[in-house]
Image (cartoon, rainbow, N blue to C red):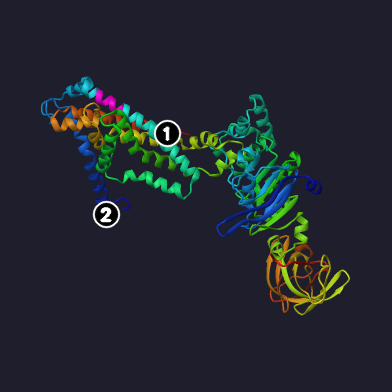
Amino acid sequence: MMRQKTTFQLLMQTGAWVVLAFLLLPMLVVLPVSLTPNEYISLPSDGFSLKHYQNYFTDPEWLSATWTSIVIALSVAVIATVLGTAFSVGCWLLSDFWSTVARWVLIVPILVPPVVQALGFYRFWVKLGLIDSMTGVILAHTLLALPYVSIAVFAALANLDRRIVQAARSLGASVWRTVIAVIVPAARPGMIAGAVFAFIVSFDEIVGVLFITVRSVQTLPKMIWQGINESIDPTIAAVATVLTVVTILIMVAVTWRWKARP
Amino acid sequence: MTTAGRLEPVLSVRGAKKHYGEVRALDGVDLDIGEGEFLTLLGPSGSGKTTLLMAIAGFTSLDAGAFRLRGEDITDLPPDRRSFGMVFQGYALFPNMTVAGNISFPLKLRKWSKAEIDARVRECLELVQMESYADRMPNQLSGGQQQRVALARALSFKPSILLLDEPLSALDKKLRADLQWELKDLHRQLAVTFIYVTHDQDEALSMSDRIVILDHGQIQQIGLPDQLYNQPDTRFVADFLGKSNFLEAKVCERLGGALDCESGGERFNVTGESSSYNGADRVLLALRPERIRIGAQGTERFHGVVRQTSYLGERCHLILDHPGFGGVLVSAPTWRMTVRPEVGGEVSFGWDDDACVVLAEDQ
């Protein structure tokens, strides 16, 4: 009797699976499409083929776009983590009215529609001569990634006892030394999470890139976008599959490492 | 030792003022702390004791006033240049360093050699009986052990003064008692000046050479523990340090060193430091509950009805109703009680002439 499920439970569970399927199926459909032997986007009808993967890994344009995206995302991860950590540590040390205001102001970009931001970048980058340059994209993405880093670092510092700073000072450490030896180590988990976030934010950002680049900077999302617009090349599905698999592998590795910790 | 300490102050506080808006956290504090003294700042929360300690440490800047360390002005010196050790209620160990790493932190900053550091870390761990814990992380230690490590860390660089901010408050009662003995012992061994902040009067009485009682940012009274307990200046001090009965009395007559007082329709003598009062003065008297004797009817001067009793093992607390005094709190040692007080029963009670203390007006 106890085992029998109520109608409510049954409905809830079925509903949950349906929602999950709704979320995941569009992502999973790229997998069969990427294996189609046809030259256009379609489900494989007679046999499977890896030629679109081969195309992705040999085509200089696709490879160059991938490298561009990786280089930009790595630069953004480094710069945004350094700046965001400095900002958060500073606010945490001050923790007065104005530092709280500053924190909120820094988070605002998350709330602004990407198109509006992109327009803003476009207007300014024209004036600064940064249009269609790697520097311009890295700078724009850094601004977009900063809120995520600062939120992650703040979360890591939230549990740090403020007396620890006083303890370090009383033991003879200058403010600078206290930051390096005590606060930054405490912020490290937040910095790592922030760097990952920053990488992802930059890696799949497209709206800003469409506005501020022309020809010389070609990122992977932009190339996929153009690929869908201009042709119906199934290589896009192969690229999407590769990205999904890499992401899952990273997730598994990170989860496994967290679990392995004492 | 205390009087010798007073001749040569290691730290002088002069006219210390700190206001937070309308709140006067420190309102003109003058204090000399003797070399090697164990001085306790005692007061209720909001009394300014923590503000004073934080200002001495250099974390709170004064609105007015000055600190001098052995004659040298340190008022504007940042905390890291003052070289005072500090121990906090929440231990404040560095979570990313081992016990040995925590203790060697101030020594590395001072650029001691590796051999010197290793020797000193071992010495400090021995001092707090934590020799076998050098490689543990702070989160693997109990509260008492963490506080021992914090103590070792604060003492490792041989500071001239050790500041302790309610270091035992987070520990359970038994551990607190053990650590009180250890702290006292450490103080005696090291001859370092201790400035100790607490709101716990028992801690203050049991450990200190001198106690400073603060309230509303002002020093209410400074003195030896027994002096403060037996001769409180004001109602606040008498009430804060231990328990007290208060009697409003009229001086009827001066009889040499004693005052003939009248209160609640009863006449009794008060001896002690009451020289400035004369006939017809109104005075406030403090009477410690343990100075009141109780006995069977007719054995003492006054009579009262038992309103409430509370048995505490070694002592028994009674509240007696007396028509003139109102409720009188009595704390009697159980082994010496000659009567078994029943609620509603009558007992007689009385006290010696030197039991009452004449208080000054509260500031």
Name the image quarter holding the C terminus of chain B: bottom right
Name the subunit of mark 2. Answer: A
Q: Chain of mark 1?
A: A
Q: Residue furthest front?
A: A127
Disc number at residue A8? 2
Would residue A61 be found to the left or right of residue A246 on screen?
A: left
Question: What amino acid is at disc 2?
Answer: Phe
Q: Is residue B173 left or right of residue A163?
A: right
Q: Is residue A73 left or right of residue B26?
A: left
Question: What label does residue A82 carry, if any?
Answer: 1
Q: Quadrant of residue B360?
A: bottom right
Element type at mark 1 = helix
- Secondary structure at numbered mark 2: helix
Say which mark, if any, is on residue B121.
none
Q: x%, y% of residue A19?
A: 24, 45
Q: Is residue A157 left or right of residue B335?
A: left
Residue farthest along the right direction in this orientation: B256
Q: Give the amino acid type for the residue marked by disc 1 in the picture.
A: Val
**Is residue B325 a member of the stretch shown in magenta?**
no
Range covered by the magenta-colored residues: A64-70
Percent position of residue A4, x then y: 29, 51
Report the mark closest to the observer, 1 or 2: 1
Q: What is the chief secondary structure element of the magenta stretch?
A: helix
| Residue B178 visible in this rendered orientation of the protein | no
A214 lies above or below B50:
above
First in residue order: circle 1 vs circle 2: 2
